[in-house]
């Protein structure tokens, strides 16, 4: 059979073969779909041809997010609530440094950090927080006149309760106890110091944030400070107060403007003002009177966050004390005031539920002032060491 005949027969068989039923999956894949999946069905041409998932809605189109409604079983089963319909607020800014190494004094707190990195922002810590500090100033000579040596042991305890109060207000209540153990000087009845001094205080504070972002703090601290050598009188009562405004200018700068009043032998009305500068996420400078401070974050050696700091402080405290017989006087009690300047450096660590610090430095320009019939004197500069805990 010739080749041409074979080719003609093959062609006739192909033409005569019945058309087979196509696979339904093949039909579905070969026909255009009416559904478009965003980011997975890009258009092949035109202005909005896409080669990747869309990140914004096309023009003249809206993207809405459905907020499901639920029935609240605690409200009778008939109330529909929108769990995403209301924005949750944030607690008021912090108004106290929980790791502050200083004693519990009215001028100690520092309000909102609002910084970044290891210094903030930090919300208020509601509930109870306890602070315990112990300090020691070794024996040092007295002068003007020289009447012996003076050694001081300091113990400061405070337990602060912080809670929110309506309309964005936050209040705190902090019972305080301070103890001073004094060794010397003795020999001059008009300048004798008791062996022990006690102070019982209650720091009350109220903070709020204005719509403009300025935080206000008002504080009042009544206290009783005495040696208990004589019956407690009005000389033992102290009424301290403060009013401070904190204005956050930007993440790096916060301005502080306020006053504080200390009820001592000398009634002191002092500025509580300055600035807090956070140049980066490791450094913080509190350029403030009466307690400036510079802190740097060192990292986490052995897994424990560690800070190093240097600070100064103008420190004043007073007590009612008993005095021995003084010629030409029938009064047997007086108020005594201790004032000095302190410069210390130290380290603090944050280890879970407890934080601690240890510091050392120098205390100078030390003055001991009495009301009549006591007589004042000075004390030489000396080393000071302190250790404390927060939990």
Image: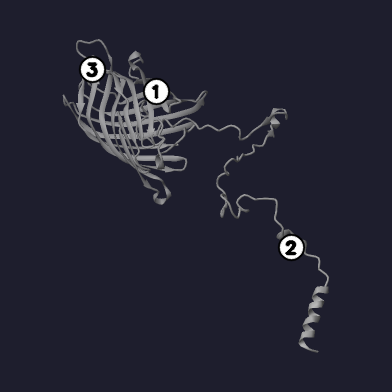
- Mark 1, Cα crowd under 10 Å, few <14 / some 14-19 / many 20+, is some
Mark 2 = which residue?
Answer: 26
SS for dot 2: helix
Eye-nearest disc, 3 or 1: 1
Q: Quadrant of residue 80?
A: top right
- Residue at 42 percent across and 27 percent down: it is 215
* x and y, in percent, of residue 335 in the image: 28, 18
- The C terminus: image quadrant: top left
* Location of residue 29 in the rendering, given as x and y in whole percent from the top left corner: 71, 60
Residues at discs 3 and 1 in contact (Cβ within 8 Å): no
Q: Earlier in the sequence, mark 2 or mark 3?
A: 2
Q: In this rendering, would 199 be left or right of 15?
A: left
Query: Residue at label 1?
Result: 200
**Neighbourhood count class around disc 2 (C-alpha, 10 Å): few under 14, some 14–19, many 20 upward:** few
Q: Is residue 30 above or below residue 243?
A: below
The residue lying furthest to the front in this view is: 4
Dot 1 falls on a residue whose secondary structure is strand
Q: Name the one closer to the observer, 189 or 121.
A: 121
- In the picture, the quarter occupied by the N terminus is bottom right
Q: Which mark is residue 374?
A: 3
Q: Where on the picture, by quarter, is residue 136?
A: top left
Q: Position of residue 2 (x, y in %)?
A: 78, 89
Q: Are marks 2 and 3 in contact (CB under 8 Å)?
A: no
């Amino acid at each position: 059979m010739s080749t041409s005949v074979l080719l003609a027969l093959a062609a006739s068989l192909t033409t005569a073969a019945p058309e087979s039923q196509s696979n339904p999956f093949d039909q579905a894949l070969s026909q255009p779909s009416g559904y478009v999946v965003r980011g997975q069905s890009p258009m092949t041409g035109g202005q909005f041809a896409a080669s990747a998932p869309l990140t914004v809605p096309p023009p003249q189109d809206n993207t809405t997010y459905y907020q499901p409604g639920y029935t609240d079983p605690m409200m009778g089963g008939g109330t529909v609530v929108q769990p995403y319909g209301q924005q949750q607020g944030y607690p008021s800014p912090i108004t106290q440094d929980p790791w502050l190494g200083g004693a519990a004094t009215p001028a100690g707190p520092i309000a909102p950090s609002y910084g970044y990195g290891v210094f903030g922002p930090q919300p208020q810590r509601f509930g109870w927080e306890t602070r315990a500090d112990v300090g020691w100033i070794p024996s040092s000579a007295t002068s003007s006149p020289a009447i012996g040596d003076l050694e001081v042991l300091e113990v400061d305890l405070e337990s602060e309760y912080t809670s929110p109060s309506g309309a964005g207000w936050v209040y705190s209540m902090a019972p305080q106890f301070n103890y001073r153990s004094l060794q010397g000087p003795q020999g001059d009845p008009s300048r004798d110091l008791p062996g022990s001094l006690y102070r019982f205080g209650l720091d009350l504070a109220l903070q709020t944030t204005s719509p403009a972002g300025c935080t206000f703090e008002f504080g009042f601290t009544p206290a009783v400070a005495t040696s208990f050598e004589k019956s407690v009188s009005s000389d033992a009562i102290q009424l301290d107060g403060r009013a401070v405004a904190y204005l956050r200018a930007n993440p790096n700068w916060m301005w502080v403007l306020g006053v504080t009043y200390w009820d001592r032998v000398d009634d002191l009305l002092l500025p509580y003002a300055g600035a807090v500068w956070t140049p980066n996420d490791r450094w913080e400078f509190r350029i403030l009177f009466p307690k400036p401070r510079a802190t740097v974050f060192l990292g986490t050696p052995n897994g424990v966050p560690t800070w190093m700091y240097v600070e100064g402080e103008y420190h004043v405290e007073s007590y009612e004390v008993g005095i021995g017989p003084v010629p030409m006087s029938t009064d047997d009690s007086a108020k005594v005031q201790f004032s000095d300047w302190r410069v210390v450096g130290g380290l603090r660590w944050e280890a879970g539920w407890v934080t601690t610090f240890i510091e050392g430095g120098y205390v100078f320009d030390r003055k001991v002032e009495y009301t009549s019939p006591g007589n004042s004197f000075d004390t030489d500069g000396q080393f000071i060491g302190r250790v404390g805990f927060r939990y």
